[in-house]
Amino acid sequence: MGLVVAIVFTVVKAATTGSSARPAASGPVVAPQGADGGAMVTGRADAKVKLEVHADYVCPFGGRFERANDAEITRVIGDGTVRQYLYPLAFLDERSNGTLHSSRAANAAATVYDKAPDKLLAFNSALYADQPAEGSDGLIRRQDRRLGPAGRRATAGH
């Protein structure tokens, strides 16, 4: 029997920002081909540990988790111990001053997974390494492209 590890970040907004204006939706995060129930899966199918990570790329708590655990997660996925199920979320779009950074980052990660799944872990790490602060403008499109070849392909046309 395998060990199931679930890491879930839930953010509850307790107060409004004083404005009822909401940014226009850019559309839902679309699960890429090969996703398992909305999760982008990395690691061996026979891994004994299932790690579920729900990530909004603007969430400061997700950023802390990623920075603290990225090297170890990459190592245990690489050695076949863990299979990661990464669920990209976009619940903090309103916290990026209208730039919809959560949706753009989640869809960029989904595009990388769709086009170059072996690059997802590195791309995920890059998104958190250059994570914008919650309440900022988020990364602008030309900054998104600095994330390397996978980032340039993922953000093309934005």
Image (tube, grey):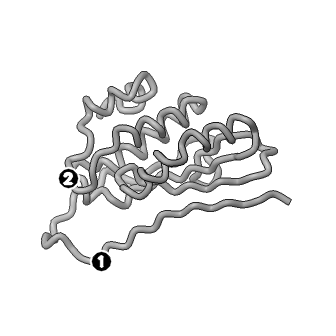
Q: Is residue 7 left or right of residue 21?
A: right
In percent of width and height, residue 34 lies at 63, 41
Indicate the position of residue 147 as horizontal and vertical percent values. 38, 29
- Quadrant in which the N terminus is drawn: bottom right
The count of marks equals: 2
Of residues 24 and 85, the one nearer the viewer is: 85
Q: Position of residue 138 (x, y in %)?
A: 25, 45
Q: Is residue 109 above or below residue 51?
A: above
Task: Residue at 54% x, 35% y: name it.
Answer: 120
- Say whether residue 132 is left or right of residue 39: left
* Extreme-right residue of the structure: 1
Q: Quadrant of residue 50?
A: bottom right
- Secondary structure, mark 1, is loop
Q: Is residue 74 left or right of residue 68?
A: right
The label on residue 1 is none
Please tell me which residue is depicted at 26% across the width and 40% down the height of the picture. 139
Residue named by callout 1: 14
Residue at point 39% right, 49% down? 57
Q: Which residue is mark 2?
A: 98
State whether residue 64 is above or below residue 18.
Answer: above
- Which quadrant holds the C terminus? top left
Query: Does residue 68 appear to the left or right of 90 in the view shown?
Result: right
Q: From this view, report whether residue 46 is shown above or below residue 152.
A: below
Where 6 sits versus 76, above or below? Answer: below
Q: In the image, what residue type sits under mark 2?
A: Gly
Q: Are marks 1 and 2 in contact (CB under 8 Å)?
A: no
Task: Report the residue that reaches farthest toward the bottom.
Answer: 14
